[in-house]
Amino acid sequence: MNESFDVAIVGAGPAGISTACILAESGVKTIVLERGEYPGSKNMFGGVLYGHDLAQILPDYVQRGCPVERNIVESRIWYLSEDGGYQLGYRDRAFDDELKFNVFTVARAKFDRWFADQAAQKGALVICSTVVTDLLRDGSGKVIGVRTDRPEGDLRASVVLLSDGINSPLAAKTGFRPEPKPENVALAVKETIALPEEVIDERFNVGPGQGVTTEILGEVTLGMNGVAFLYTNKASLSVGIGANLADFAARRVKPYEMLERFKAHPMVAPLIKAGKPREYLAHWLPEGGYDAIPQLCGDGFLVAGDSAMLFNAPHREGSNLAMASGRLAAEAIMEALQRGDFSRRGLAGYSARLESSFVIQDLKKYRHFPGFLGRHHEIFTTLPGAAAAAAREMIRVDGVPKRRKQQSILRNLRRRLPLLDWIRLLWDGWRAFR
Amino acid sequence: MSVKVEDKLFLNRFRVDEESHLGLIDYSLCTRECPDQPCLYICPANVYRLEADRISVNYEGCLECGTCRIGCPHFNIEWRFPKGGYGVRHKFG
């Protein structure tokens, strides 16, 4: 590979392909290097993608045959104890009308492949089965290309976009981002469970093509700071659970055992009953929030998507931040190409654009969220059981006067969590979400 | 609850390289200085197993998440991606 490119992109995920689409459309000589056999073959997420950010790259993505699993018409939140739980959901006709495809599920092995095809049709060169093992630098340290695991695999480029995801040995080796600390990532495992389309429609009370997302907190993560999810695909369910990696290490919990327990929960088991597991995968989620974002660009390189730790945990938004950061990287790269300046200063338009976009603004808003969950393990330990006991008591009909029930519930809540801790929880919670 | 992770890994497609992409830098360190041995339980694919008195590395079922690399308290795991095109191959993702 003696050819040189304007831009080399590491990783064919939502961030890298977004950049490639925009650059290739403008005639910028772009190469995408993907380590998997095909784009998406190494990629995994919960399952939710966002139409607004995809449309900014491909306005006609529906006509182009984007492989949508289900259009999300209802979003649920569950707070579970060991034996039951609270549920809250919101459904709206608008989500199947003017907001159709604002939120939808995809399978990454299909979506990323399709997305990379669109970039290739626009003129980007997408090369698979190629691992980028190092960055090439000149005497001053400026990045001038990449080294791959192919024979004579050095490749020169004016700009390198690092969109190789959260797990990046390249980052660790080259130092463009420090290796994440265990407390800054969550380890999630997910099973894809096949069920007939009509069975999913019935169990989730939706019509054909319509879907439901469920985000789940509580005792299911066995006292660890974590979250579970249940998403509907066309003819399968994505059932996953994750927790902070530092918590996993401290608690000696095996991820797949936690997943099996979750699948057996009384609120989950009936929904996946008779389903056939088809795939079992594991992946990290960037959990550090705003304070874990690395330097976003340097001399000759930019960092986007999960590589840049762009993940909005309270809203489970990640794929849209990847696509938006990829788009803004493309804009900044084109600016740099016009000026012929690929130094950190020349690429700084990227940081500026991200700062003024919803991406950084949202992460800033929830800056205290990771710390909030880390400091308040009661959300995952004592509170689910206490909340469950309260509901059970109020619903149970047993001749006990309601005022007495109320008093015993309050006593129990105070006993499980002292008043001062309640105040601390509410105060920190307000700070995390305001 | 005892779960056989092999049943789960069996669902996946792998293109296994003859050469391991994972390795322990110093095998003796694991028994000498690591009483907790978190690799034995944090790995979602149960790649690391205690056999007799040493840890074996069953790289064939690795899901390439990176957990062992940063979860090893002694950073004793040499971690590369499998060669291009090798390793786990997602059908669904």
Image (spheres, rainbow, N blue to C red):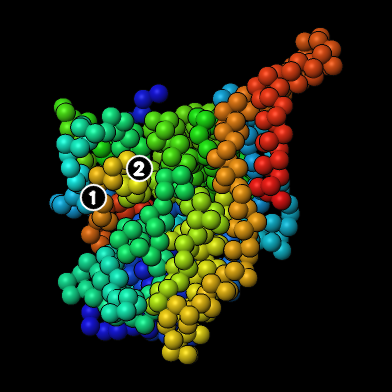
Dividing the picture into quadrants, the one containing residue A424 is: top right
Task: Describe residue A371's horizontal placement relative to residue B9 as left or right.
Answer: right
Amino acid found under the numbered disc labelled 1: Glu
Dividing the picture into quadrants, the one containing residue A371 is: top right
Question: In the rendering, at what x and y percent does residue A39 appear?
Answer: 37, 64
Amino acid found under the numbered disc labelled 2: Gly
Q: Which residue is mark 1?
A: B78
Q: Chain of mark 1?
A: B
Task: Describe residue A167's horizontal placement relative to residue A77 as left or right.
Answer: left
Instruction: State the SS at label 2.
Output: helix
Instruction: State the SS at label 1.
Output: strand
Question: In the rendering, at what x and y percent does residue A269 appear?
Answer: 52, 30
From what the image shows, is residue A345 above or below residue B1?
below
* Residue pictured at 33% horizontal, 70% vertical: A33
From what the image shows, is residue A392 above or below residue A319?
above
Q: Chain of mark 2?
A: B
Query: Considering only order in the chain, which callout, 2 or 1, is on the residue closer to the N terminus?
Result: 2
* Residue pictured at 25% horizontal, 46% vertical: B77
From what the image shows, is residue A128 above or below residue A282?
below
Label number found at residue B71: 2
* Residue pictured at 72% horizontal, 34% vertical: A423
Question: Which residue is more in the foreground, A360 or A56?
Answer: A360
